[in-house]
Amino acid sequence: MASPDIFASAYHSFLSTLSDNDRARYDDKCTPQGLLDGLKRISSLAKGTQNRRSQKPFAIVRDFNERMRPFFAIIEGPVTQSSVYAGAALGALRLVLELASCFPTLLTKILQCIKDITESFPRYEALEDICRGKLSSRLLVHLGRVYRDLFDFFDSAATLFTASSGKVRRPVELIASVIWRPFDERFGGILSSMSKHQQQLNDEVNIYQLELTRDVATTSEEICKDTQATHASVSGLQEQVRLQTREQAIARIQSWLNAPNFANTYWNTLDECQDDTAQWIFEVDKFQEWSESNSRGSSAPDSRILWIHGNPGGGKTVLAASIVRELSAYNQNLVYFFFKE
């Protein structure tokens, strides 16, 4: 049976055993406060329990509400979007207490059973924190069994106080029923089954926690591997950047230290010259004076400089290359440099 069907089956099974009168009184949307309010309206409660210090009806019901709150909170999300199953269970307990209100002694026993049930429930707050609305199918099945046990108890209690006609049993009939089947025997099996299912639920919670721990460990291991891979990748990139930066710095320094390739300018210019292109410069008086002063080793500043000026593209490079070629014909130690680049 699917988990949601367990809850629905328990609810509808209880509903089907009620008489028309009890079904009309049954509030399947009961709230925790509504359960307490119903207990207050039971007129015979005080007479039956005020001298019993061991029984505290309102405290028992409040404890039941508090212990079951996380239980209902856990099942509401996966099973249904409304609070129908919580309200159905609280309403069933309220109806049972109302039916038992005419029999103070049995009401006390019913309340004692509720106390025992409450104390046997595990702390569902921990399960609520662990699951966070995401229950495994196995956990949901075990929760459904506990829910069905609750309704088995409510059904058995309601049947005890109600005759086949649907009316509340007369005291003589009730006493005979209890004598024929004692109270402890009537509810002992249900309480034992509930205890068994709750233990199974505890075991399933432990398994669920182990699975979560395993998943967390696996995820942590994967994250660690990813982090290590990322760190290695970043380290590799850092090393590549360092080497690239170093190589670029070396290249810039070498480029700065290396002499310009001015010889190519000289030879390329000569290759582009036509024959006798710059012969006229050698016949200019200024050039001849400069050439003679250099050959004599004159130390006068003006005599050591030949200044040729002109517009861009006017042929200054061609003239300079022609002069270098002319001078190198009789001067093997000639030094020249083109400041073109």
Image (cartoon, rainbow, N blue to C red):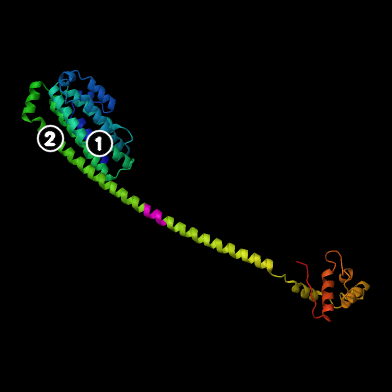
Residue 252 drawn at (x, y percent):
65, 64
Segment colored magenta: 220-225
Q: Amino acid at mark 1?
A: Ala
Q: Secondary structure at mark 1?
A: helix
| Residue 222 among those drawn in magenta | yes
Distance CA(mark 2)–CA(mark 1): 24 Å
The quarter holding residue 152 reads top left
Question: What residue is shown with label 2?
Answer: 188
Question: What residue is shown with label 1?
Answer: 8
Residue drawn at x 75%, y 74% is 263
Q: Nearer the viewer, mark 2 or mark 1?
A: 2
Question: From the image, which quarter does the C terminus lie in?
Answer: bottom right
Q: Is any atom of residue 30 visible in this view?
A: no
| Residue 68 among those drawn in magenta | no
Residue 313 drawn at (x, y percent):
83, 66
Q: Nearer the viewer, residue 82 or 232?
A: 232
Residue drawn at x 26%, y 33% is 68
The quarter holding residue 31 reads top left
Residue 310 vertical placement versus 332 (above, below): above
